[in-house]
Image (tube, rainbow, N blue to C red):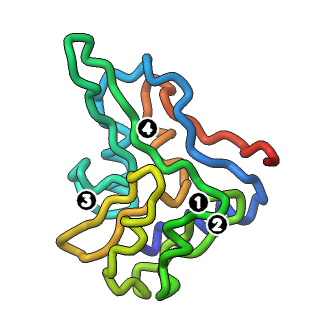
Amino acid sequence: MVYEKKLQDKKSEGGKKEVLKVVDIHRCIGCYSCMLACARTLQQSFSPARAALQIRTAGGFQSKFVAEICLGCIDAPCAQACHCGALTFREGGGVKFRPEKCMGCRLCAENCVVDVLKFDEEKNKPIPCIQCGQCVKFCPHEVIAMEERKDE
C-alpha cells in the first residue's frame, strides 16, 4: 500500500482533476490487462478479482463487454459513509484510501451508487478505485482513459 500513497501524492501534485472514463467499450477484447495491472499494483495480487475495476461479458451471442468502473463522484457517497476516515474525498472526484484506518464495516461498499466498490473478504477491507490510472497504462486497445473532469 506504500505504492498507493505515492500514486495519490503524485496525482495531487499536478492539480489535475482527472478521473477514469470508458472511452470505447466496443474496442474491448476481454484481455483483463487493466484488471491485472490494478490488482498487481494496488493489492499486490495476481487475481483479477482483486481489481478495483471489473470487465465482464454482457452475455448473449454477441459477447460484448461491460466495464464496471468507479465514476469518481465529487461527493463520493462511499467516503461519506466511512466513519473511521479510511476513505476520504479526493480533489477532482473519487476517494483516497487509508487501509490502516479501515474497520471493515462495509458501509462504503453498501453506499456505492453504482455498486462497483467490492470488498476483499480475506483482508476484510474494500477495494476502492483511487483514480491512479494504472489500468489505463496497460489497456492495449485504449478502451479506458484518464480524462480531465469538466467543471460541473
- Residue 138: give its label: 4
Residue 94 percent location from the top left of the image:
58, 60
Q: Earlier in the sequence, mark 4 or mark 2?
A: 2
Mark 3, residue position:
45
Counting residues from the N terminus, which is met first, the one under dot 4 or under dot 3? Answer: 3
Label 3 crowd bin: few (<14), some (14–19), many (20+), radius 10 Å: some
Q: Residue at x 21, y 17 (%)?
A: 60
Q: Indicate left or right for 50 with 70 as reference.
A: left
**Residue, disc 2:** 90
The Cα–Cα distance between marks 4 and 3, rounded to whole angstroms, is 16 Å
Which residue does the image show at 78% across and 59% down from the upper left?
Answer: 15
What is the spatial separation of the Cα atoms under label 2 and label 1, in whole angstroms? 5 Å
- In the figure, residue 57 lies in which quadrant? top left
Q: Amino acid at mark 3?
A: Ser
Residue 35 vs residue 5: left or right? left
Above or below, 139 against 73 in this view is above
| Residue ID at (62%, 48%) | 19
Of marks 3 and 2, which one's residue comes earlier in the chain? 3
Q: Distance of mark 3 from mark 1, alpha carbons?
A: 23 Å
**Residue 94, numbered circle:** 1
